[in-house]
Amino acid sequence: MSRTHRPRLGVPGWVFVPAVLGAAFVVLPLLAMLTRVDWTQFPQLVTSDSSRAALLLSLRTSAASTVLCVAFGVPMAVVLARTQFRGQSVLRSLVLLPLVLPPVVGGIALLYTFGRRGLLGHTLEVLGLQVAFSTAAVVLAQTFVALPFLVVSLEGALRTGGQRYEEVAATLGARPTTVFLRVTLPLVLPGLASGAVLAFARALGEFGATITFAGSLQGVTRTLPLEIYLQRETDPQAAVALSLVLVVVATVVITVTRRSRSAL
């Protein structure tokens, strides 16, 4: 009886060359930044009043923008993945536009929407609300650039998961809301977690839309990326130290989320 040999699946050897070069392209700049850190002054550089205020503001606003991304992004992803209607492709393109749009353009668009002379600015002013150049403006700017990351991730999870279990639940008499809460969301929870962390990380690093729409007021709108930019002009060592803090925070968030997703 002859033994059937299965073909060995492997990666072509030449693939490792561009893979290593690509990894080096990402890792080497980070290592170069480590070599420029003045470790003897590191605690003082990252614990100054302005640095701590910027970091705490970034964490608060990024968390708030992530909540908004989930609140808006989950329904948007469900509509795009589970329905068919005229103009859907155009809507999807517009929703994903911030992925390729320069952030400063997004900031200008937000300014002409929520600013004092913007499309909704007068109405908001009558209600006693001033959005531009406030902490709320930071949250809106971060949400604008981060929302597509959650939509893309969750829409992909919804399309990959299919609709079999949802159809079974509907056949058994479950209402659409029950199917959505009890079947759909649990099935795509890993995709939702992945999208949320991507949105948080993107919000944490947002710069262009924030400085255009919210400005740079210490303790109010000056997030960590803005603080790094300002410190780069006056204290390069502080800028490098704060950049490292931002890298560490982003790495921890991504690592924790990947482990949580694997556990699910």
Image (cartoon, rainbow, N blue to C red):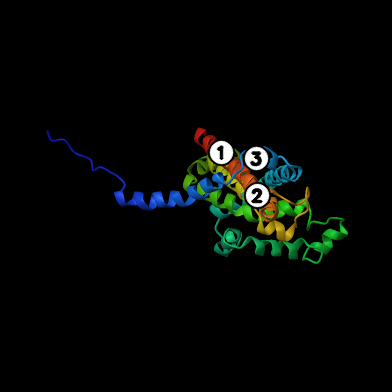
Give the number of the disc on residue 98: none
For the point 54% across and 49% down, which residue is it? 153
Q: Nearer the viewer, mark 1 or mark 2?
A: 2
* Mark 3 in CB contact with mark 2 (< 8 angstroms): no
Report the side of 179 relative to 4 (left or right). Answer: right
Of the numbered discs 3 and 2, the one sitting upstream in the chain is 3
Q: Secondary structure at mark 3?
A: helix
The foreground one among 125 and 244 is: 244
26 lies left or right of 19: right
Of the residues shown, which amino acid type is indicated by label 3? Answer: Phe
- SS of the residue at dot 1? helix
Which residue type does callout 1 highlight?
Thr
Q: Look at discs 3 and 1 and give the one toward the viewer.
A: 3
The answer to whether residue 163 is visible is: yes
How many numbered circles does the render carry? 3
Q: Which badge, 3 or 1, comes first in the chain's sequence?
A: 3
Q: Marks 3/2: CA distance?
A: 11 Å
Task: Kindly identify which residue carries mark 2.
Answer: 239
Furthest-left residue in view? 1
Q: Residues within 10 Å of mark 2 (few under 14, many from 20)?
A: many
Q: In the rendering, at what x and y percent does residue 82 appear? A: 55, 52
Question: Eyeballing the image, is 69 above or below 43?
Answer: below
Sort mark 3 into few (<14), some (14-19) or many (20+) by Cα contacts within 10 Å. Answer: some
Q: CA distance from mark 3 to mark 1?
A: 28 Å
Q: Which residue is mark 3?
A: 42
Residue under label 1: 257
> From what the image shows, is residue 78 above or below residue 106?
above
